């Protein structure tokens, strides 16, 4: 029986992809790294991994957008 976690990509391997490297020119590297780690951790739990550089870029951007979205909402007093 093989461990399917061995098939998961390394964080550094994903960060070296051209599409992901390009994100670090416009976004803080710590956010990009955190997003990649979170996506890989979700895959350990059974979530599908992005396929290809474009899918990784979209997934990382989506994670960062969710993470940096303001949590406060306007309220009427």
Image: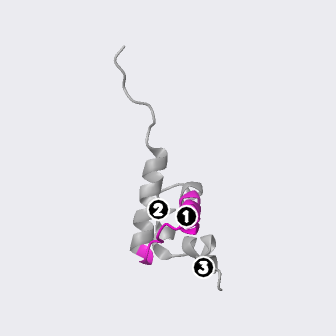
- SS category of the residue bearing label 1: helix
- Image spot of residue 54 (x, y percent): 39, 73
Q: Pick out the residue farthest to the top.
A: 77
**Prevalent SS, magenta region:** helix
Residue depicted at x 60% and y 79%: 4
- Image spot of residue 70 (x, y percent): 44, 38
Q: Residues within 10 Å of mark 3 (few under 14, many from 20)?
A: few
- Image spot of residue 30 (x, y percent): 59, 56
Q: CA distance from mark 1 to mark 3?
A: 18 Å
- The front one of 23 and 65 is 65
Residue depicted at x 34% and y 17%: 76
- The front one of 76 and 2 is 2
- Tell me: 73 left or right of 14: left
Q: Which residues are magenta?
A: 33-53
Residue depicted at x 47% and y 63%: 23
- SS category of the residue bearing label 3: helix
Observer-side mark, 1 or 3, equals 3
Rendered-image quadrant of the N terminus: bottom right
Q: Which mark is residue 36?
A: 1
User: Which mark sits nearer the N-terminus, 2 or 3?
Assistant: 3
Residue marked by disc 2: 60
| Magenta region includes residue 35 | yes
């Amino acid at each position: 029986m093989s461990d399917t976690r061995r098939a998961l990509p390394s964080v550094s391997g994903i960060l070296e992809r051209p599409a992901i490297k390009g994100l670090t020119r416009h976004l803080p590297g710590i956010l990009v790294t955190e997003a990649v780690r979170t996506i890989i951790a979700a895959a350990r739990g059974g979530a599908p991994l992005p396929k290809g550089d474009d899918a990784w870029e979209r997934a990382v951007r989506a994670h960062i957008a969710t993470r940096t979205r303001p949590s406060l909402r306007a309220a009427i007093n």
